[in-house]
Protein backbone atom coordinates (compact mmCIF):
# COMPACT_ATOMS: atom_id res chain seq x y z
CA UNK A 1 0.00 0.00 0.00
CA UNK A 2 1.37 3.40 -0.92
CA UNK A 3 2.19 5.97 1.68
CA UNK A 4 -0.65 8.22 0.43
CA UNK A 5 -3.23 5.42 0.73
CA UNK A 6 -2.05 4.62 4.24
CA UNK A 7 -2.37 8.28 5.18
CA UNK A 8 -5.90 8.49 3.76
CA UNK A 9 -6.93 5.30 5.57
CA UNK A 10 -5.55 6.64 8.85
CA UNK A 11 -7.41 9.92 8.35
CA UNK A 12 -10.69 8.14 7.71
CA UNK A 13 -10.17 6.01 10.80
CA UNK A 14 -9.65 9.10 12.93
CA UNK A 15 -12.84 10.66 11.53
CA UNK A 16 -14.80 7.48 12.25
CA UNK A 17 -13.49 7.36 15.82
CA UNK A 18 -14.35 11.04 16.36
CA UNK A 19 -17.85 10.48 14.99
CA UNK A 20 -18.35 7.51 17.31
CA UNK A 21 -17.14 9.54 20.28
CA UNK A 22 -19.41 12.46 19.34
CA UNK A 23 -22.44 10.20 18.98
CA UNK A 24 -21.60 8.56 22.29
CA UNK A 25 -21.25 11.94 24.02
CA UNK A 26 -24.61 13.09 22.60
CA UNK A 27 -26.25 9.88 23.76
CA UNK A 28 -24.88 10.34 27.28
CA UNK A 29 -26.05 13.97 27.39
CA UNK A 30 -29.51 13.04 26.16
CA UNK A 31 -29.72 10.22 28.71
CA UNK A 32 -28.68 12.50 31.57
CA UNK A 33 -31.02 15.26 30.40
CA UNK A 34 -33.87 12.78 30.17
CA UNK A 35 -33.32 11.89 33.83
CA UNK A 36 -33.41 15.50 35.05
CA UNK A 37 -36.81 16.11 36.60
CA UNK A 38 -36.18 19.77 37.49
CA UNK A 39 -34.63 22.48 35.35
CA UNK A 40 -34.69 26.29 35.55
CA UNK A 41 -37.40 26.23 38.20
CA UNK A 42 -39.60 23.94 36.09
CA UNK A 43 -40.68 20.41 36.91
CA UNK A 44 -40.68 17.94 34.02
CA UNK A 45 -43.75 15.90 34.80
CA UNK A 46 -45.57 12.85 33.55
CA UNK A 47 -47.07 12.92 30.07
CA UNK A 48 -44.69 15.72 29.04
CA UNK A 49 -46.30 18.30 31.35
CA UNK A 50 -44.19 21.19 32.59
CA UNK A 51 -44.97 22.93 35.89
CA UNK A 52 -43.40 25.96 37.50
CA UNK A 53 -41.97 25.56 40.97
CA UNK A 54 -44.22 27.38 43.51
CA UNK A 55 -42.61 30.74 44.30
CA UNK A 56 -41.58 31.90 47.75
CA UNK A 57 -43.80 34.83 48.83
CA UNK A 58 -42.11 38.21 49.14
CA UNK A 59 -43.40 39.61 52.44
CA UNK A 60 -42.58 43.18 51.40
CA UNK A 61 -44.95 42.85 48.42
CA UNK A 62 -47.72 41.43 50.60
CA UNK A 63 -47.34 44.18 53.21
CA UNK A 64 -47.20 46.86 50.52
CA UNK A 65 -50.37 45.59 48.85
CA UNK A 66 -52.09 45.49 52.25
CA UNK A 67 -51.15 49.11 52.92
CA UNK A 68 -52.16 50.21 49.41
CA UNK A 69 -55.56 48.52 49.54
CA UNK A 70 -56.13 49.92 53.03
CA UNK A 71 -55.41 53.49 51.88
CA UNK A 72 -57.75 53.02 48.93
CA UNK A 73 -60.48 51.63 51.16
CA UNK A 74 -60.26 54.69 53.41
CA UNK A 75 -60.22 57.14 50.50
CA UNK A 76 -62.97 55.37 48.52
CA UNK A 77 -65.09 53.23 50.84
CA UNK A 78 -67.71 52.96 48.07
CA UNK A 79 -65.37 50.79 45.97
CA UNK A 80 -65.41 47.08 46.75
CA UNK A 81 -62.07 45.35 46.35
CA UNK A 82 -61.51 41.68 45.49
CA UNK A 83 -58.48 39.49 44.98
CA UNK A 84 -58.24 36.28 42.97
CA UNK A 85 -54.86 34.56 42.82
CA UNK A 86 -54.74 31.63 40.41
CA UNK A 87 -52.84 28.74 42.02
CA UNK A 88 -50.10 27.08 40.01
CA UNK A 89 -50.51 23.70 38.33
CA UNK A 90 -48.08 22.19 40.86
CA UNK A 91 -50.47 23.18 43.63
CA UNK A 92 -53.59 21.69 42.04
CA UNK A 93 -52.32 18.76 39.98
CA UNK A 94 -49.45 17.55 42.14
CA UNK A 95 -50.14 13.93 41.17
CA UNK A 96 -48.35 14.65 37.88
CA UNK A 97 -45.15 15.84 39.55
CA UNK A 98 -42.04 13.66 39.04
CA UNK A 99 -41.50 10.91 41.57
CA UNK A 100 -38.14 12.44 42.47
CA UNK A 101 -39.49 15.99 42.82
CA UNK A 102 -38.74 16.02 46.53
CA UNK A 103 -40.56 18.34 48.87
CA UNK A 104 -42.60 20.86 46.88
CA UNK A 105 -43.58 24.13 48.52
CA UNK A 106 -47.15 24.14 49.87
CA UNK A 107 -48.67 26.99 47.86
CA UNK A 108 -52.13 26.42 49.32
CA UNK A 109 -50.71 27.26 52.74
CA UNK A 110 -48.97 30.35 51.34
CA UNK A 111 -52.23 31.58 49.79
CA UNK A 112 -54.10 31.00 53.05
CA UNK A 113 -51.51 33.12 54.85
CA UNK A 114 -51.77 35.90 52.25
CA UNK A 115 -55.55 35.82 52.54
CA UNK A 116 -55.35 36.28 56.31
CA UNK A 117 -53.18 39.38 55.84
CA UNK A 118 -55.24 41.01 53.07
CA UNK A 119 -58.83 40.05 53.88
CA UNK A 120 -59.44 43.09 56.10
CA UNK A 121 -59.42 45.38 53.05
CA UNK A 122 -60.73 43.12 50.30
CA UNK A 123 -62.79 40.02 49.59
CA UNK A 124 -60.98 36.84 48.60
CA UNK A 125 -62.02 34.70 45.64
CA UNK A 126 -60.93 31.14 46.40
CA UNK A 127 -59.97 28.98 43.43
CA UNK A 128 -58.18 26.16 45.22
CA UNK A 129 -61.36 24.41 46.38
CA UNK A 130 -62.97 24.94 42.98
CA UNK A 131 -59.98 23.66 41.03
CA UNK A 132 -59.50 20.70 43.36
CA UNK A 133 -63.03 19.64 42.46
CA UNK A 134 -61.98 19.65 38.78
CA UNK A 135 -58.32 18.64 39.07
CA UNK A 136 -58.63 15.87 36.50
CA UNK A 137 -59.74 18.31 33.80
CA UNK A 138 -57.56 20.31 31.41
CA UNK A 139 -57.20 23.43 33.59
CA UNK A 140 -53.61 24.36 32.75
CA UNK A 141 -51.56 24.19 29.59
CA UNK A 142 -48.87 21.51 29.57
CA UNK A 143 -46.27 23.95 28.22
CA UNK A 144 -47.32 27.22 29.89
CA UNK A 145 -48.24 28.37 33.42
CA UNK A 146 -51.57 29.83 32.25
CA UNK A 147 -55.12 28.58 32.44
CA UNK A 148 -56.63 26.94 29.38
CA UNK A 149 -59.87 28.23 27.91
CA UNK A 150 -61.69 25.70 30.08
CA UNK A 151 -59.80 26.72 33.23
CA UNK A 152 -60.29 30.43 32.46
CA UNK A 153 -64.00 29.77 32.22
CA UNK A 154 -64.11 28.32 35.74
CA UNK A 155 -62.06 31.22 37.11
CA UNK A 156 -64.23 33.86 35.42
CA UNK A 157 -67.45 32.35 36.76
CA UNK A 158 -65.98 32.23 40.27
CA UNK A 159 -64.89 35.87 40.11
CA UNK A 160 -68.18 37.16 38.67
CA UNK A 161 -70.17 35.25 41.27
CA UNK A 162 -68.01 36.49 44.15
CA UNK A 163 -68.42 40.08 42.94
CA UNK A 164 -72.20 39.75 42.94
CA UNK A 165 -72.52 40.16 39.18
CA UNK A 166 -74.43 37.92 36.79
CA UNK A 167 -72.56 35.56 34.50
CA UNK A 168 -74.05 34.74 31.13
CA UNK A 169 -76.33 31.70 31.32
CA UNK A 170 -76.46 31.12 27.59
CA UNK A 171 -74.82 28.29 25.75
CA UNK A 172 -71.11 28.76 25.07
CA UNK A 173 -69.35 28.17 21.78
CA UNK A 174 -65.78 26.88 21.78
CA UNK A 175 -63.48 28.44 19.18
CA UNK A 176 -60.20 26.73 18.37
CA UNK A 177 -57.53 29.36 17.78
CA UNK A 178 -54.61 26.97 17.35
CA UNK A 179 -53.91 23.26 17.76
CA UNK A 180 -50.12 23.64 17.69
CA UNK A 181 -49.71 25.97 20.67
CA UNK A 182 -46.45 25.66 22.59
CA UNK A 183 -46.08 27.87 25.65
CA UNK A 184 -43.16 29.63 27.24
CA UNK A 185 -42.15 26.56 29.28
CA UNK A 186 -41.61 24.42 26.17
CA UNK A 187 -37.90 25.29 26.10
CA UNK A 188 -37.48 23.31 29.32
CA UNK A 189 -38.56 20.03 27.77
CA UNK A 190 -36.05 17.21 27.63
CA UNK A 191 -33.88 17.06 24.52
CA UNK A 192 -35.86 14.06 23.32
CA UNK A 193 -39.12 15.97 23.67
CA UNK A 194 -37.70 19.17 22.23
CA UNK A 195 -36.30 17.70 19.04
CA UNK A 196 -38.78 14.88 18.65
CA UNK A 197 -42.21 15.22 17.14
CA UNK A 198 -44.57 17.16 19.41
CA UNK A 199 -48.08 18.05 18.22
CA UNK A 200 -48.60 21.04 20.48
CA UNK A 201 -51.75 21.97 22.39
CA UNK A 202 -55.18 23.38 21.73
CA UNK A 203 -55.44 27.12 22.32
CA UNK A 204 -59.16 27.81 22.54
CA UNK A 205 -61.71 30.24 23.92
CA UNK A 206 -65.31 29.93 25.09
CA UNK A 207 -67.79 32.64 24.07
CA UNK A 208 -71.42 32.92 25.28
CA UNK A 209 -73.91 32.95 22.41
CA UNK A 210 -75.68 35.98 23.90
CA UNK A 211 -72.46 37.94 24.46
CA UNK A 212 -73.24 41.67 24.14
CA UNK A 213 -71.54 43.90 21.58
CA UNK A 214 -68.37 45.58 22.80
CA UNK A 215 -65.25 47.42 21.73
CA UNK A 216 -61.92 48.15 23.32
CA UNK A 217 -59.49 51.04 23.28
CA UNK A 218 -55.77 50.50 23.66
CA UNK A 219 -54.71 53.59 25.59
CA UNK A 220 -51.06 53.43 24.50
CA UNK A 221 -51.88 53.62 20.78
CA UNK A 222 -55.33 55.20 20.97
CA UNK A 223 -56.59 52.54 18.53
CA UNK A 224 -60.16 51.23 18.78
CA UNK A 225 -60.84 47.54 18.19
CA UNK A 226 -64.03 45.55 17.76
CA UNK A 227 -62.44 42.45 19.27
CA UNK A 228 -60.41 41.50 22.33
CA UNK A 229 -58.23 39.18 20.28
CA UNK A 230 -55.24 39.70 17.98
CA UNK A 231 -55.19 36.87 15.45
CA UNK A 232 -51.81 37.95 14.05
CA UNK A 233 -50.20 36.90 17.35
CA UNK A 234 -51.02 33.26 16.64
CA UNK A 235 -48.12 33.16 14.19
CA UNK A 236 -45.72 34.97 16.54
CA UNK A 237 -43.17 33.57 18.99
CA UNK A 238 -45.76 33.92 21.77
CA UNK A 239 -49.23 32.89 20.52
CA UNK A 240 -50.70 33.63 23.98
CA UNK A 241 -50.53 37.29 22.91
CA UNK A 242 -53.72 36.53 20.97
CA UNK A 243 -55.43 38.00 24.04
CA UNK A 244 -55.34 41.80 23.65
CA UNK A 245 -52.16 41.58 21.57
CA UNK A 246 -50.16 40.91 24.75
CA UNK A 247 -49.71 42.83 27.98
CA UNK A 248 -50.87 46.40 27.38
CA UNK A 249 -50.42 49.24 29.90
CA UNK A 250 -54.14 50.02 29.96
CA UNK A 251 -57.14 48.76 27.99
CA UNK A 252 -60.65 50.18 28.17
CA UNK A 253 -63.51 47.82 27.28
CA UNK A 254 -67.02 49.14 26.72
CA UNK A 255 -69.88 46.64 26.65
CA UNK A 256 -73.57 46.84 25.75
CA UNK A 257 -74.31 45.15 29.09
CA UNK A 258 -75.94 48.27 30.55
CA UNK A 259 -75.83 47.82 34.31
CA UNK A 260 -73.80 50.79 35.58
CA UNK A 261 -70.99 48.51 36.78
CA UNK A 262 -67.37 49.49 36.13
CA UNK A 263 -64.70 46.90 36.91
CA UNK A 264 -61.04 47.82 37.28
CA UNK A 265 -58.81 44.76 36.84
CA UNK A 266 -55.20 44.98 38.04
CA UNK A 267 -53.41 41.91 36.75
CA UNK A 268 -50.69 40.00 34.96
CA UNK A 269 -50.73 37.75 31.88
CA UNK A 270 -52.92 35.25 33.71
CA UNK A 271 -55.70 37.84 33.63
CA UNK A 272 -55.60 38.15 29.83
CA UNK A 273 -57.52 34.94 29.12
CA UNK A 274 -60.04 35.53 31.92
CA UNK A 275 -61.05 39.18 31.41
CA UNK A 276 -62.74 38.55 28.01
CA UNK A 277 -65.30 36.43 29.87
CA UNK A 278 -66.35 39.48 31.92
CA UNK A 279 -67.89 41.48 29.06
CA UNK A 280 -71.37 40.06 29.65
CA UNK A 281 -71.28 41.07 33.31
CA UNK A 282 -69.93 44.64 33.36
CA UNK A 283 -70.72 47.77 31.40
CA UNK A 284 -67.13 48.97 31.50
CA UNK A 285 -63.88 47.12 32.20
CA UNK A 286 -60.47 48.69 32.68
CA UNK A 287 -57.58 46.24 32.43
CA UNK A 288 -54.22 47.45 33.73
CA UNK A 289 -50.90 45.60 33.68
CA UNK A 290 -48.71 47.19 36.37
CA UNK A 291 -45.63 45.65 34.73
CA UNK A 292 -46.27 47.97 31.75
CA UNK A 293 -48.00 50.93 33.40
CA UNK A 294 -46.84 53.87 35.52
CA UNK A 295 -50.33 54.67 36.85
CA UNK A 296 -50.84 54.49 40.58
CA UNK A 297 -53.72 52.54 42.08
CA UNK A 298 -55.16 55.69 43.64
CA UNK A 299 -55.05 57.68 40.39
CA UNK A 300 -56.75 54.84 38.52
CA UNK A 301 -59.54 54.72 41.09
CA UNK A 302 -60.04 58.48 40.95
CA UNK A 303 -60.07 58.66 37.14
CA UNK A 304 -62.29 55.69 36.32
CA UNK A 305 -64.38 55.59 39.52
CA UNK A 306 -64.89 51.81 39.42
CA UNK A 307 -67.62 50.17 41.41
CA UNK A 308 -65.33 47.17 41.89
CA UNK A 309 -61.60 46.43 41.72
CA UNK A 310 -60.29 42.93 41.07
CA UNK A 311 -56.64 42.07 41.64
CA UNK A 312 -56.16 39.12 39.31
CA UNK A 313 -52.77 37.41 39.26
CA UNK A 314 -51.16 34.06 38.86
CA UNK A 315 -50.01 33.15 42.38
CA UNK A 316 -46.38 32.76 41.32
CA UNK A 317 -46.30 36.20 39.70
CA UNK A 318 -48.02 37.91 42.62
CA UNK A 319 -45.46 36.54 45.07
CA UNK A 320 -42.48 38.04 43.26
CA UNK A 321 -43.73 40.84 40.98
CA UNK A 322 -42.79 44.17 42.53
CA UNK A 323 -44.68 46.22 39.94
CA UNK A 324 -47.91 45.75 41.90
CA UNK A 325 -46.11 46.96 45.03
CA UNK A 326 -45.01 50.04 43.09
CA UNK A 327 -48.47 51.13 41.95
CA UNK A 328 -50.06 50.30 45.29
CA UNK A 329 -47.59 52.42 47.27
CA UNK A 330 -47.70 55.52 45.04
Image (tube, rainbow, N blue to C red):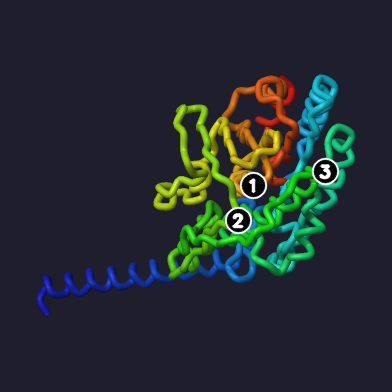
Residues at discs 1 and 2 in contact (Cβ within 8 Å): yes
Nearest to viewer (mark 2 / mark 3) = 2
- 278 vs 243, left or right, is right
Q: Residues within 10 Å of mark 1 (few under 14, many from 20)?
A: many
Q: Which residue is mark 2?
A: 208
- The residue nearer to you, when weighing 76 against 248, is 76
Label 3, secondary structure: give it.
strand
Q: Quadrant of the N terminus?
A: bottom left
Residue at (67, 40) in percent of width and height = 282
Q: Which mark is residue 124?
A: 3
The image quarter in which residue 147 lies: bottom right
Residue 295: percent from the left, percent from the top? 63, 23
Image point (50%, 32%), residue name: 218
Name which of mark 2 and mark 3 comes first in the sequence. Answer: 3
Q: Nearer the viewer, residue 268 or 319?
A: 268
Residue ID at (59%, 39%): 255
Residue 205 place in picture, x, y as percent: 56, 56
- Asked if 131 appears above or below 313 in the picture, the reply is below
In the shown orientation, is residue 32 left or right of residue 131? left
Label 3 crowd (10 A; few <14 / some 14-19 / many >=20): many
Q: Earlier in the sequence, mark 1 or mark 2?
A: 2
Q: Residues within 10 Å of mark 2 (few under 14, many from 20)?
A: some
Circle 1 residue: 280
Q: Can residue 43 be spotted in the picture? A: no
Q: Quadrant of residue 114?
A: top right
Structural distance between the alpha carbons of marks 2 and 3: 26 Å
Q: Given contact means CB atoms under 8 Å apart, are the residues at marks 2 and 3 in contact? A: no
Mark 3 or 1: in front is 1
239 or 28: nearer the viewer: 239
Which x, y percent locates residue 142? 59, 62
Amino acid sequence: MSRRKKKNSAGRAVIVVLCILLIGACAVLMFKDQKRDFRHGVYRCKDGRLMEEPAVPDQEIIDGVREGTELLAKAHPEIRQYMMLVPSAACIQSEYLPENAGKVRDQAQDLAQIQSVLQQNLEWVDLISLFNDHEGEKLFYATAPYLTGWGSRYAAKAAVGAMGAEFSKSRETCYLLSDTYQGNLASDRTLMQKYGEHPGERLEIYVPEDEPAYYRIDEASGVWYGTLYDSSSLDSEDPFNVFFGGDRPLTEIYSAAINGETLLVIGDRTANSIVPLFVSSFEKIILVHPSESTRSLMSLAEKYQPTKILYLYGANTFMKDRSLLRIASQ
